[in-house]
Amino acid sequence: MGCPRPSNGSGTLVLGALLILAPAATQAQTSDGDLPQINVEARAKKPAAAKPRRLAPTRPNRPVVVVNPQPGGEAASASTGTPPIKQTYQLPQTAASVTAAEIEQKINVVDSEDAVKYMPSLFVRKRNNGDTQPVLATRTWGVNSSARNLVYVDDILISALIGNNNTIGAPRWGLVAPEEIKRVDFLYGPFAAAYPGNSMGGVLLITTRMPDKLEMTAKQVESLQTFDRYKTSGTYRTDQTSVTLGDRNGNFSYFISGNFQNSYSQPLSWVTTTNTPAGTSGTIPQLNKTGSVANVVGAGGLLHTEMANLKGKFAWDITPLVQAVYSIGYWSNDADSRVESYLRNAAGLTTFGGVSGFAGGNYTLNEQHLANSLSVKSDTKGTFDFDLSASRYDWLEDIQRNPYTVVAGSAAAAFSKNGKIARLDGTNWMNGDAKGIWRPNDAHEISFGLHADRYFLNNPTYATPTWNSGPDSTSALYTNGRGATRTAALWLQDAWTFAPALKLTLGGRLEDWKAYDGYNLQTAQSAAGAILSTSAKLQPELDATRFSPKASLAYEPSKEWLATASFGQAYRFPTVSELYQIVSSGTNLQFPNPNLTPENVLSEELALERRFKDGKLRLSLFHEYVRDALISQTGVVPGSTTLFTFFSNVDAIRNRGIELAAQKDNFLIDRLEAFGSVTYVDSRIVSDPDFVSATGTTATGKRVPYVPDWRATLGATYRPDAYWALTAAMRYSGKQFSTLDNTDIISNVYGAFDSFTVVDLRAQYKFSETATANFGVDNVGNAKYTLFHPFPGRTYVADVKIKF
């Protein structure tokens, strides 16, 4: 599945070189009036002594009707300019953006996380349409690092900082429908005091739309995936219906969206065993990722989901300069997962052959989540502005039921009657922020704030005599994990323009963290599910107080060039699931570690940016050194195919690399937009003296788990006229390891992390300003690769959108 290393980023390198050298591009930017207004100060001048006033609320003039904007127009410059939040708070990070117009034209979008598909160095581990576990990977951290980046939708933090994994720690993407999105911005690195240490990987900001007049939209999406691996072959369909309604009436405006998705997935797991079950045929000889026997006897996780999303956003202009916004979002998911056995008995009937792993891939899941947020903020652009916000996320219901095992020796496939009920309802988190911006003069812009959060995990797993019926809890517990964390923080930042072309940004963040009320219960069980013994423990409280300094120097000699050097220290505190969550699901086990310490990150970046009238080229050199890195890894219980995950502090790791990102309209020919990025990361374990291996391997000097060495994206969009937009894009990722000693070298087996190259196509046709049709194909070449789970094959996506 790999490709020769020299070619991984060659397209982007060529694009970058041509952007610098092409005379036409150089001449195009010589007129200052043609360039976007981007400068070091990046804010409006302080108004005169007269109190700033906004005109009485009126609807803005209607924009000129444009079907497909000319390249280099408003739609393009919006993503190459400065993100609004970066400008408002003078945030020093390097940024990348994508607008709603670009998303519609370039990306085959089914779920909201698809919007970041082509952003530099970003990757979302989306296994299937409607996936509830799509973790965001950034340029220095991989798909198991959900707590090493932050994802916001307006004022709601949808990052699930109850975990740092690729299960319950994944962002709650389902809370935002694709049709809500106005723009997506990504800020690289922990260089802004306004964000906690979880920003070490970056901050993703999703801004949703708010209408200025009555508008309604309806959109229908259909998707078909073809999949063929081992003995499972099929076509898996997704249907999605989206509607929106919004309006402004004087000081009041609102936007309501609804989304319903019905989807079927390819197998998300393979059922394996160390032998050939007696009296059966159909076993496929196979190894696991580390080379041990893991014969494939069936497929699991053939998932059917019915997912709904209802979101409301309501705004009130308290004064012309102060606005209050309340948002509420409800998300539900009803899913059932089935298995497919390849085994046949002597009579030719399907059987499970006594392999208990089939039970773990067969389950029902019912989820209902609710999010609320309230914000009040000013926008005077004068001496002082403020921003107050609070949000809460609740798991109202989260219940998974599955059989405990299979019936041994049955003539046909049958599950045990007893089973497990795993629950997460009651889990919740709250965040509150009070921010201010003081502009005493033209040289200084001082921002500051207070932050508080609390995260609570509630995760009992019950034994039930009837897994597919009856009450959702019993008096018998298999496991229980419960606990909470809270953080209080104070931060301050000064953006000081001390010379016309120089800006120094200094900041610091003081955080006080505590983990408390930790409780764990574990049991020993018989093969049939009987509880043999129970142990329970109240875990010790942990606390830490840390200060994180930040510094950034920006040099902007002209509107065409910007150089930035940034440094930031950050502390990431352990999540409540790393400390307290016990998971026992089929052949997957997870063990917490209540004695983890915060990881300490020193991050640096040197970035050089070249701007054009209709594009941008950026080169970034980055370095990151982490002490006490919190690493999760997955191994195999000796003599079985049971996977277990555990957490530990690794003494020291180091990530260093280079990133090149480019975007240019009218590239080589008129109406052709080229975009792309290539990232190389040398990610190494510097010291891990506590690593123990039964085979004598070592971790020191090995690659950090889940971080690929190369990532690349290269794409082009051609707009032959005002109605058509044609896009082709390629995505590449290098090999990843999931073990500290890098012994998982077998590719394309369950649990492996492969390199991959996929090509996507999309065509958009606009009938008018109010009607659009799209057709596309993801993974055109039907590449077969595994990122722990088998990933989708060739997928066709078509949609029709009508705006009223």
Image: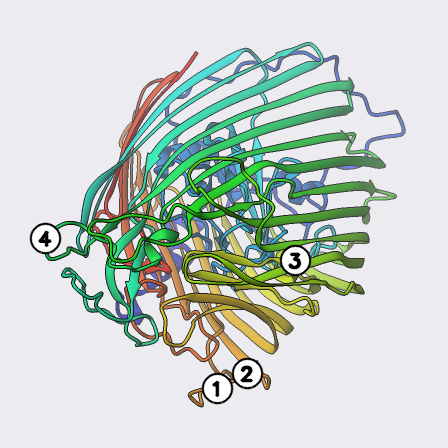
Q: Amino acid at mark 3?
A: Thr
**SS at mark 3?**
loop
For disc 4, the neighbor class at 10 Å (few under 14, some 14 to 19, many from 20) is few
Residue nearest the observer in this picture, 429 or 339: 339
1 and 2 marks in contact (CB < 8 Å): yes
Measure the alpha-carbon separation of dots 2 and 4.
50 Å
Residue nearest the observer in this picture, 412 or 60: 412
Please provide percent x and percent y for residue 25: 41, 49
**SS at mark 4?**
loop
On residue 347, the disc is 4
Q: Residue at x 76, y 41 (%)?
A: 432
Q: Which of the two labelled residues, at mark 3 and mark 1, occupies the earlier sequence position?
A: 3
| Quadrant, the N terminus | bottom left
Work out whether 405 lies above or below 112. Answer: below
Q: Amino acid at mark 1?
A: Thr
Measure the alpha-carbon separation of dots 3 and 1.
27 Å
Measure the alpha-carbon separation of dots 2 and 3.
22 Å
Residue nearest the observer in this picture, 14 or 774: 774
Please provide percent x and percent y for residue 401: 46, 43
Q: Which of the two labelled residues, at mark 3 and mark 4, occupies the earlier sequence position?
A: 4
3 and 1 marks in contact (CB < 8 Å): no
For disc 1, the neighbor class at 10 Å (few under 14, some 14 to 19, many from 20) is some
Residue extending farthest to the left is: 347
On residue 698, the disc is 1
Q: Which of the two labelled residues, at mark 2 and mark 3, occupies the earlier sequence position?
A: 3
Which residue is tagged 3?
Answer: 575
